[in-house]
Amino acid sequence: MADYSRFIKQQISSRLYRPDGTVETTRNPAVWTMAHRGYSGSGRLDVWVYATKQEAVREGAKLAMACGMDEDEQACRDFNAGRWQKVLDRYEESHPDTHLLRVQAAFLQFPE
């Protein structure tokens, strides 16, 4: 049987801020995903799963560069400095709304 423990981790799924100043944090099992929809694939949404957020963001930045951001001076500076999230942000702000390149936690749903 495969061991998925590297990928499935307890992530913050919600935070409730109460008027008395207390904070209630809920955690649920999730995986880190990178989702991409661009010019290729006829509008298809591709999703990859990574063991850590850092790995997903770094790989997302590499994909952004391969999808044309290597011609954007600011994206190149951010990429070379290891500011992966800034490269992803630049991709989304410089592409049409129909495009997506985003890293986020995907929470697992279990039948009740």
Image (spheres, rainbow, N blue to C red):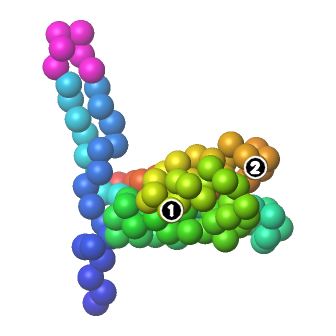
Span of residues in magenta: 17-22
Between residues 111 and 94, which one lies in front from this camera angle?
A: 94
Q: Position of residue 68 (x, y in %)?
A: 73, 64
Count neighbours of disc 2 (C-alpha within 10 A) and say few if under 14, some if 14 to 19, many if 20 or more: few
Residue at the spot of label 2: 95
Between residues 53 and 48, which one lies in front from this camera angle?
A: 53
Magenta: main secondary structure:
loop
Above or below for 45 versus 86: below
Q: Quadrant of the N terminus?
A: bottom left
Per the image, is 89 magenta? no
Q: Nearer the viewer, mark 1 or mark 2?
A: 1
Could you tell me the amino acid type at mark 2? Answer: His
**Residue 8: quarter of image:** bottom left
**Residue 4: quarter of image:** bottom left
Count neighbours of disc 1 (C-alpha within 10 A) and say few if under 14, some if 14 to 19, many if 20 or more: few
Q: Is residue 14 left or right of residue 65?
A: left
Q: Is residue 3 visible?
A: yes
Q: Is residue 106 visible?
A: no
Residue at the spot of label 1: 80
Between residues 23 and 28, which one lies in front from this camera angle?
A: 23
**Residue 56: quarter of image:** bottom left
Could you tell me the amino acid type at mark 1? Answer: Asn
Above or below for 19 versus 60: above
Residue at 25% x, 55% y: name it: 10
Per the image, is 21 magenta? yes
Residue at 30% x, 57% y: name it: 29
**Disc 2, SS:** loop
